[in-house]
Image: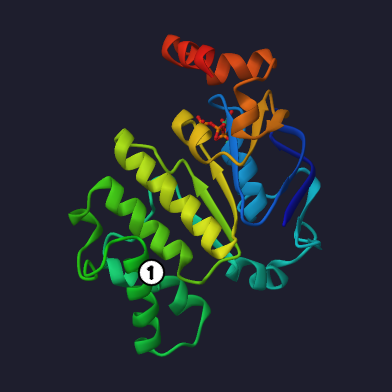
């Protein structure tokens, strides 16, 4: 489990996060939603250690990540898989080399063992046999799947995903969401997803936190979101006429 306690983050005068506390549990798809600029990515970056919070603490299974030095964090970093917004694949490496990258960095496995693991991960994301392709030869959805294969290569306990649906058509988006949800269930990862996508919210949102003005404005599940009387959340989720009409039928 990950617990964040009273997280603040300021960039100069810009106080982006203003005291956020939340728990992210294993086997759950934990979604962070909110308007543009509400601090979703900043919160995710604080949790994985890419930003240091100005105030507050982050615990991984009860261990205080915030007070750890670089070396102390390494065992936790090894348990983290991350899919970045643009997939962040290395363009000069093949699909297989991209997936083996964390294994090269963090393990002393033989090349054959790493290849075995890369093949397993590729098969898991339905890209069997695509080993030798370069990122430039892949569609956006395939890139995301390679990014997911790389993120799970180290059998992570914690899976962080920033905007998995950006740039994807609705059908591919849903396939990526389903893959994330399946992996979360199968490996009981603590999964944290930053998203704008309402299909994702409704489809896989086991636990959702809604950020507004740098604070946690609402928290609940996809089943509860439809019946919320929180005005800001309602305005955010049911912004379009289509979603308002859908809500009335729920
Ligand atoms: N490295 C940084 N330096 C200075 N300001 C930053 C930095 N990163 C983020 N910010 C500021 O923090 C605020 C929140 O940004 P953040 O990317 O967390 O929002 P978001 O909710 O993820 O937005 P979006 O949905 O548009 O991606 C913005 O005002 C942004 O300018």
For residue 34, side relative to residue 96 (left or right)? right
Label 1 CB less than 8 angstroms from ligand 1: no
Q: Is residue 156 above or below residue 239?
A: below
Rendered image quadrant of residue 128: bottom left
For residue 202, side relative to residue 2 (left or right)? left
Rendered image quadrant of residue 112: bottom left
Q: Position of residue 76 (x, y in %)?
A: 66, 68
Q: Nearer the viewer, residue 216 or 72?
A: 216
Q: Indicate the secondary structure of the residue bearing disc 1.
A: helix
* Residues packed near mark 1 inside 10 Å, few (<14), some (14 to 19) or many (20 plus): many
Q: Position of residue 40 (x, y in %)?
A: 59, 36
Q: Nearer the viewer, residue 21 or 191?
A: 191
Rendered image quadrant of residue 169: top left
Q: Is residue 181 above or below residue 109?
A: above
Which quadrant, please, contains the C terminus? top right
For residue 86, side relative to residue 203 (left or right)? left
Residue 122 visible in the shown view: yes
Q: Is residue 125 above or below residue 216?
A: below
Residue 83 visible in the shown view: no
Where does label 1 land, which residue? Answer: 121
Which quadrant, please, contains the N terminus? bottom right
Q: Position of residue 99 (x, y in %)?
A: 37, 69
Q: Position of residue 25 (x, y in %)?
A: 69, 52
Residue visible at 24% across and 70% down in the picture: 131
Residue visible at 64% across and 71% down in the picture: 74
Q: Nearer the viewer, residue 54 or 18?
A: 18
């Amino acid at each position: 489990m990950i617990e964040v306690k009273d997280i603040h983050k300021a960039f100069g005068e810009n106080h982006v996060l203003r005291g956020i506390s939340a728990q992210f549990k294993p086997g759950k798809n934990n979604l962070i939603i909110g308007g543009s600029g509400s601090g979703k990515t900043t919160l995710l970056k604080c949790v994985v250690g890419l930003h240091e919070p100005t105030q507050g603490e982050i615990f991984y299974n009860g261990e205080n990540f915030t007070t750890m030095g670089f070396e102390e964090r390494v065992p936790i970093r090894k348990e983290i898989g991350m899919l970045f917004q643009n997939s962040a694949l290395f363009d000069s490496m093949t699909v297989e080399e991209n997936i083996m990258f964390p294994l090269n960095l963090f393990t002393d496995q033989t090349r054959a063992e790493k290849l075995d693991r890369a093949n397993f991960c590729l098969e898991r994301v339905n890209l069997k046999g695509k080993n030798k392709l370069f990122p430039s030869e892949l569609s956006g959805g395939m890139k995301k799947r390679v990014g997911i294969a790389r993120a799970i290569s180290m059998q992570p306990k914690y899976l962080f995903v920033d905007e998995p649906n950006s740039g994807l058509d609705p059908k591919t988006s849903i396939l990526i969401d389903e893959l994330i949800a399946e992996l979360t269930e199968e490996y009981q990862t603590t999964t944290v997803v930053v998203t704008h996508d309402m299909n994702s919210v409704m489809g896989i949102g086991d636990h959702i936190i809604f950020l507004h003005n740098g604070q946690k404005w609402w928290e609940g599940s996809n089943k509860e979101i439809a019946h919320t009387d929180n005005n800001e959340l309602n305005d955010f989720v049911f912004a379009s006429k289509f979603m308002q009409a859908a809500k009335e039928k729920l």
